[in-house]
Image (cartoon, rainbow, N blue to C red):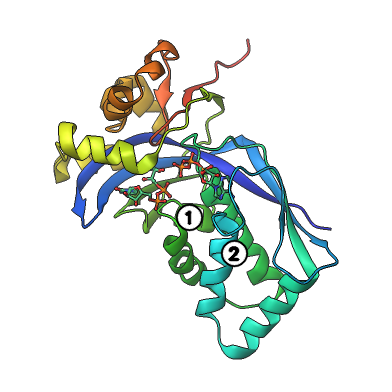
Amino acid sequence: MKIYKAYAKVNIFLKITGIRANYHEIISRFMRVDSLYDELSFVSKESEEFKIIGDFSCTTEQNTIYKAYIYLLDSLDEALSVSLQNLMQKYAVHVKKNIPAFAGLGGGSSDAATFLKMCNEVLHLGLSQNELAIVGLKVGADVPFFVYGFDSANVGGIGEVVEEFREPLLDFEVFTPKIEISTPKVYAVYRENFFAPIDGFKTNELKTTTSYDILKKMSIDEANDLFKPALQEYRELKNYYKQGYYFSGSGSSFFKVKEKEK
Ligand SMILES: C[C@](O)(CO)[C@H](O)COP(=O)(O)OP(=O)(O)OC[C@H]1O[C@@H](n2ccc(N)nc2=O)[C@H](O)[C@@H]1O
Ligand SMILES: Nc1ncnc2c1ncn2[C@@H]1O[C@H](COP(=O)(O)OP(=O)(O)OP(=O)(O)O)[C@@H](O)[C@H]1O
C-alpha cells in the first residue's frame, strides 16, 4: 500500500499584520522540515465505520483527518461523495505519528492536507490545489500551505494566501518541550498584551529576504510575534530556551539551522 508523507513545518518568521474577526492576519515564512513527517496510508478494515488507526490523544471526531473527510464530502457532487464514502467504508487511514502534537509544527494540519491529496489521487476527484486548499482552510489555518506542498512559502491572510518562495531548503534541528500550548490562547494573549501589527514596508522586506538571512539577522522575539505571549502564558517555556534557537508558530517547538559537518 502506498505511503504518503505528511511533513512538519517551521515558521522562520511570523508577524501579525492585523485582525480578522476572531483570527489574526499574519505574514509568515513557512518551511517544510524534510527530516520530520507522519506516514499515512489506506489499509483495509472489517467494519464500515470511519476509522483512523494511530497514536492520537483526541477522538476521531476531533481529528483533523476526520474533519477534512467531512468538509471534502460536503464539497463533492452526489456521485463523487458516494465514491468517497465507499472508500472510507473499505479502508481505514493508518497514521504513523512522528510529529509531536501541540508543537507548532503543524502536524494535525499536515495530516489533513495529505489525507485530502490521497483522496483526490485515489478517487480521481480532479480537484485543483486551490480547490483542495479551500476545503483545507475549513479544517485549519495551516492546512493550505501543506496542500500546495512547497518547500518554502510566504503565507498571508490567516493562512489562505500561499506564495512559493524559491530558496534552498534548510536542514533543521528541532526540539519540542513537553508543554501543551493552546494556539488560540497564545493569539489571545498577543491581542491583549502585545498587539503591534507591522506595516507594509516591513512586510515587503521580510517577504523578499531568504530564510537563512532572516535567521542570521533577527532575534527569536523579533522573528516571531507569538514568542513573548507564549512565554508570558507558559512561564516554564523559559527553562527550555537555548541561545541561537527560534520559536515555531505558537510553540512549543524551538528550532535552529543544523551546522554543516566539516
Ligand atoms: C500559529 C500557526 O500555526 C502558524 O503557522 C497558525 O497561525 C495557527 O494555525 P492553526 O493551528 O491551523 O489554527 P486554527 O486551528 O485554524 O485556529 C485555532 C485558533 O487560533 C487562533 N488563530 C489562528 C490562526 C490565525 N491566523 N489567527 C488566530 O487568531 C484563532 O483563535 C483560532 O480559532
Ligand atoms: N491528525 C492529528 N494529529 C495530531 N493531533 C491532532 C490531529 N487531529 C487533531 N489533533 C489534536 O489537535 C491538538 C494539537 O494538534 P497539532 O498536532 O496539529 O498541534 P499544533 O502543534 O498545535 O499545530 P500548529 O502548528 O498548527 O499550531 C491536540 O489536541 C490533538 O489531539
Is the residue indicated by label 1 positioned so its CB lies within 8 Å of ligand 1?
Answer: yes
Identified at 69% across, 66% down, the residue is 50
User: According to the image, label 2 marks what residue?
Assistant: 116
Amino acid residing under circle 2: Leu
Identified at 77% across, 72% down, the residue is 48
User: According to the image, label 1 marks what residue?
Assistant: 143
Amino acid residing under circle 1: Val
CA neighbours of label 2 inside 10 A, class few (<14), some (14 to 19), many (20+)? many
Q: Is residue 139 above or below residue 170?
A: below
CA neighbours of label 1 inside 10 A, class few (<14), some (14 to 19), many (20+)? many
Is the residue indicated by label 2 positioned so its CB lies within 8 Å of ligand 2?
Answer: no
Question: SS of the residue at dot 2?
Answer: helix
Asked whether the residues under the numbered discs 2 and 1 touch, taking CB atoms below 8 Å apart as contact, a structural biologist would say: yes
Q: Quadrant of residue 220?
A: top left
Q: Give the alpha-carbon distance from disc 2 to disc 1, as whole Å.
A: 10 Å
Give the percent coordinates (x, y) of residue 117. 62, 63
Q: Is residue 217 above or below residue 21?
A: above
Identified at 28% across, 46% down, the residue is 26
Residue found at the very far bottom of the displayed protein: 78
Give the percent coordinates (x, y) of residue 11. 41, 36
